[in-house]
Image (cartoon, rainbow, N blue to C red):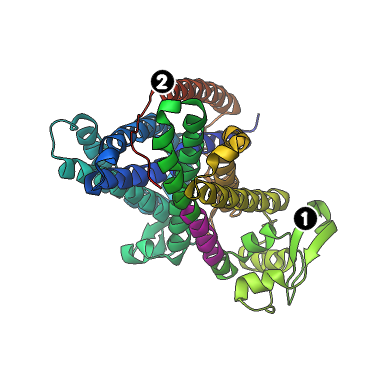
């Protein structure tokens, strides 16, 4: 058993588990804060109490999700010292700074006011309690910012010098203003809004169909959550488009691999699908849309895009002999899975939004009944997007500075990694099943009566 391969699998599995909860946390904190703001500001008496109950309803779902995110995130950080000690030795001075700031400025802020929010319903004024909700949202999203500052350095190193075989930070401002952070953070923020919006729509549709006493309350939620989901998906698309354009400068290998573009092209086509033969540096079949890839990158139907073979040759000249290609097949199809899921979610938002605002949901009960089947869409999109982001920098763990094979702990054995990987994978699975059971039972047992009805 190869310790390097198993360590990569272990970190990937832990990260996928963790990333099931992180985007949902980011989006749900904002959603709950918006709901509580609505509760504070609404002038409609018949909406006041249902709105308060909805805040507690979705706040409880957030707490269940948050607890799983913390558990998986803590274990993930131990990997850096136990599985990837050479990585920690090489760039711990840089990577440690944003992680420390994440704990000191974001996690403490989030966790402190989360406790105040949980236990302060009858002890704080409504406005102060609402302020706590917004501070939780600020803390969780600030936490994501610091994590992505660290990750962006791995993708596009800036603000460092090499000293004694180690990367050391010499410009903290350059680290936090890394242009890579803008694309990664905005994409993660809107992904969180999309994930939370999709969950809220699915839960609301379920309650609308199966809980008659809560129907009117969740009719109103469907109207608002459709807008929330649409904003999230459109934001994901816009930020993703912006970040993809930046990849042409920051990481042309990742960009070319996402399109399985082997040779330079001007204009470059967009491959809707392809049969990829990475062993022979070619696609045996392609279904292409002419000039679309250049249009996406340069906002005009012309412009050269470097192919995988060209970029690989340049990296060989710069870094020495080797194969600097990532998993082209995985990147190509992961990108398309992500885009397809996003498109499907936007259609759902537009459809549910239109029907709910026209008060015609009752005419399409089958649509609401099948909506729960679409809940995996944002999680599938997030996982595919994570693979594009992290798989696209391989074989580097820090692009241009350290390869993944050089970062693994030297004294680690394959058996040790396998046993811990199997144990934690099983444990996380049990925890997720338990959390889903608690969440589903809570959703089914909680009703929110609503006396009035808004047009």
Give the residue at mark 1.
273
**For numbered disc 2, what is the local secondary structure?**
helix
- For the residue pair 331 and 35, the one nearer the viewer reads as 35
* Residue range corresponding to the magenta coloring: 231-243
Q: Position of residue 94 (x, y in %)?
A: 37, 54
Please tell me whether mark 1 or mark 2 is closer to you in this view.
2
**The quarter of the displayed image where residue 3 is located:** top right
The reply, left or right, for residue 224 in relation to residue 260 is: left
- Mark 1: few, some, or many residues within 10 Å (few <14, many ≥20)? some
**Which is nearer the N-term, disc 1 or disc 2?**
1
Q: Residue furthest right?
A: 284
Residue at the spot 13% in from the left edge and 39% down from the top edge: 125
**For numbered disc 1, what is the local secondary structure?**
strand
Q: Position of residue 99 (x, y in %)?
A: 34, 47
Instruction: Identify the image quadrant of the N terminus.
Output: top right
- For the residue pair 42 and 238, the one nearer the viewer reads as 42
Give the residue at mark 2.
445
- For the residue pair 448 and 289, the one nearer the viewer reads as 448
**The quarter of the displayed image where residue 74 is located:** top left
Query: Relative to 35, does residue 270 appear above or below in the rendering?
Result: below
Q: Position of residue 48 (x, y in %)?
A: 26, 39
Residue at the spot 64% in from the left edge and 65% down from the top edge: 315
Query: Relative to 151, does residue 133 appear above or below in the rendering?
Result: above
Q: Position of residue 341 (x, y in %)?
A: 62, 48
Residue at the spot 32% in from the left edge and 47% down from the top edge: 34
Residue 83 visible in the current orientation: no
Disc 1/disc 2 C-alpha distance (Å) = 45 Å
Residue 187 visible in the current orientation: yes
The reply, left or right, for residue 46 in relation to residue 264 is: left
């Amino acid at each position: 058993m190869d310790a390097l391969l198993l360590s990569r699998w272990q970190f990937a599995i832990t990260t996928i588990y963790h990333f099931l909860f992180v985007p949902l946390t980011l989006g749900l904190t904002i959603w709950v804060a918006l709901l509580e703001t609505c509760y504070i500001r609404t002038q409609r008496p018949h909406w006041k109490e249902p709105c308060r109950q909805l805040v507690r309803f979705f706040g409880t779902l957030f707490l269940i999700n948050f607890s799983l995110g913390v558990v998986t995130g803590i274990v993930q950080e131990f990997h850096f010292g136990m599985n990837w000690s050479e990585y920690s030795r090489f760039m711990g001075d840089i990577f440690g700074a944003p992680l420390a700031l994440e704990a000191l400025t974001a996690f403490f802020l989030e966790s402190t006011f989360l406790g105040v929010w949980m236990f302060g319903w009858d002890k704080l004024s409504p406005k102060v309690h609402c302020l706590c909700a917004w501070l939780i949202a600020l803390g969780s999203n600030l936490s994501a910012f610091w994590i992505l500052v660290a990750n962006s350095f791995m993708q596009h190193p800036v603000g460092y010098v090499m000293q004694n075989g180690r990367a050391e930070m010499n410009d903290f401002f350059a680290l936090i203003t890394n242009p890579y952070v803008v694309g990664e953070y905005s994409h993660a923020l809107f992904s969180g809004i999309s994930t939370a919006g999709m969950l809220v729509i699915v839960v609301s549709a379920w309650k609308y169909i199966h809980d008659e006493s809560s129907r009117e309350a969740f009719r109103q939620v469907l109207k608002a959550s459709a807008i929330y989901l649409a904003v999230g998906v459109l934001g994901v698309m816009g930020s993703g488009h912006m970040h993809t354009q930046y990849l042409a400068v920051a990481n042309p290998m990742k960009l070319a691999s996402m399109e399985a573009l082997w040779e330079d092209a001007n204009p470059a086509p967009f491959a809707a699908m392809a049969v990829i033969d990475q062993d022979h540096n070619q696609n045996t079949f392609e279904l292409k849309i002419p000039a679309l890839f250049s249009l996406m990158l340069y906002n005009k139907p012309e412009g050269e895009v470097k192919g995988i073979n060209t970029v690989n040759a340049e990296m060989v000249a710069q870094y020495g002999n080797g194969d600097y290609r990532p998993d082209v097949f995985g990147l190509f199809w992961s990108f398309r899975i992500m885009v397809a899921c996003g498109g499907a979610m936007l259609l759902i938002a537009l459809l549910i939004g239109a029907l709910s605002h026209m008060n015609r949901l009752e005419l399409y009960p089958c649509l609401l009944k099948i909506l729960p089947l679409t809940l995996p869409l944002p999680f599938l999109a997030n996982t595919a997007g994570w693979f594009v982001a992290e798989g696209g920098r391989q074989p580097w763990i820090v692009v241009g500075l350290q390869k993944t094979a050089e970062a693994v702990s030297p004294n680690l054995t394959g058996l040790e990694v396998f046993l811990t990987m199997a144990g934690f994978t099983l444990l996380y699975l049990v925890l997720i099943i338990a959390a889903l059971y608690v969440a589903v039972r809570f959703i089914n047992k909680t009703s929110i009566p609503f006396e009035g009805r808004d047009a």
